[in-house]
Every structure is written in structure tokens, then in C-alpha cells.
Image: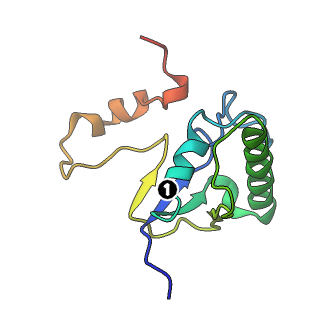
């Protein structure tokens, strides 16, 4: 019996995939967000990583994400990425958002138990911008 690993649900666009130009008719065009593969290597054996995206609703979307991530990881390894020498990397892709211990997403707000939080007003929600679309300060 294998050890229980907490599930971390990781969004694809804007978290793994740079998503610099937003949605482009389903084409995955960008690069891996720097540090992702290094982070992934540190989670090995400690967390179950499950990728979920709006792309996950179709088999074509799942295949495209898996293929792109495989190609990007091979390029990272070729460029000197420090991977485990023998163990294959296990990443799961889900059709539906999995029950997770934690979700990593560029378009989320961490609810703190207070519906009166100013960050939850309609104006604040409409003003929200993910990290890759904010202007540098």
C-alpha cells in the first residue's frame, strides 16, 4: 500500500503555462512559468500533483496539455534542469476539479471566513488582475 499524499490541484494557464496572450483559440503557445519544474521536483514523493484547467473538459485539451508539458520538460532537462535521475515524474491530469488539500491558481481569492472583506466587493472583484497582467510597480 502506497503512502497517502495530499492532493494539490494546479491550474494550467497562467500557473504552469505563461499564458502571455490570453486565450488563443485553444492553442498552447507560451513557455513554462519559471521555477515550475524545480518546484515540481521538490514535491516528488510529498504531494500528489493534479493539473486541472478549463481545457480539461475535453480529451483534446488533456492531450494537448500533457504533450506540451512533456515537450517543455524535455527542453528543461536538455538545458540542464536538475531532475531525479531514475524515478519518472508523476503528474495527473483531471477531467474535473479534484478534491484537493490545496489549489494553486492565478485567478483565485483565499477566502478568510469574512464575507464583508473589502476584497469581495463587486468593485474589487471586477478590478482583480492575475499576476501576469498587472503592471510592474
> Could you say where residue 32 lies in the image, as x and y percent from the top left?
67, 37
The residue sitting at 75% across, 56% down in the picture is: 66
Hey, which residue is sitting farthest top in the picture?
Answer: 137
* The one of 11 and 118 positioned closer to us in this rendering: 11
- In the image, 83 versus 130, the foreground residue is 83
Residue 25 falls in image quadrant: top right
Give SS at disc 1: helix
Q: Percent from the top left, x then y, of residue 72?
A: 75, 43
- At a point 53% along the width and 53% down the height, the residue shown is 10
40 horizontally vs 77: left or right: left
- Say which residue label 1 marks: 43
Q: Is residue 105 above or below residue 118?
A: below
Can the viewer see residue 15? no
Which residue reaches farthest front?
A: 85
Q: Nearer the viewer, residue 127 or 111?
A: 111
**How busy is the neighbourhood of tag 1: few (under 14 within 10 Å), some, or many (20 plus)?**
few
Picture residue at 55% right of the left edge, 27% below the top: 132
Residue 92 in the image: state x and y as whole percent. Answer: 63, 66
Is residue 57 placed above or below 78 in the rendered structure?
A: below
The answer to whether any part of residue 32 appears in the image is: yes
Q: Quadrant of residue 46?
A: bottom left
In percent of width and height, residue 116 lies at 18, 43
**Left or right of residue 104: residue 20:** right
Q: How are the colours assigned in the image?
A: rainbow
Question: From the viewer's perspective, is 61 left or right of 2?
Answer: right
Amino acid at each position: 500500500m502506497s503512502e497517502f499524499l495530499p492532493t494539490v490541484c494546479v491550474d494550467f494557464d497562467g500557473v504552469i503555462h505563461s499564458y502571455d496572450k490570453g486565450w488563443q483559440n485553444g492553442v498552447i503557445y507560451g513557455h513554462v512559468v519559471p521555477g515550475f519544474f524545480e518546484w515540481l521536483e521538490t514535491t516528488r514523493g510529498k504531494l500528489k500533483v493534479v493539473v486541472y484547467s478549463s481545457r480539461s473538459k475535453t480529451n483534446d485539451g488533456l492531450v494537448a496539455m500533457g504533450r506540451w508539458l512533456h515537450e517543455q520538460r524535455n527542453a528543461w532537462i536538455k538545458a540542464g534542469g536538475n531532475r531525479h535521475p531514475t524515478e519518472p515524474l508523476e503528474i495527473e491530469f483531471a477531467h474535473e476539479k479534484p478534491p484537493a488539500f490545496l489549489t494553486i491558481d492565478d485567478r483565485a481569492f483565499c477566502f478568510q471566513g469574512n464575507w464583508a472583506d473589502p476584497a469581495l466587493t463587486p468593485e474589487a472583484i471586477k478590478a482583480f488582475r492575475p499576476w501576469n497582467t498587472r503592471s510592474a510597480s
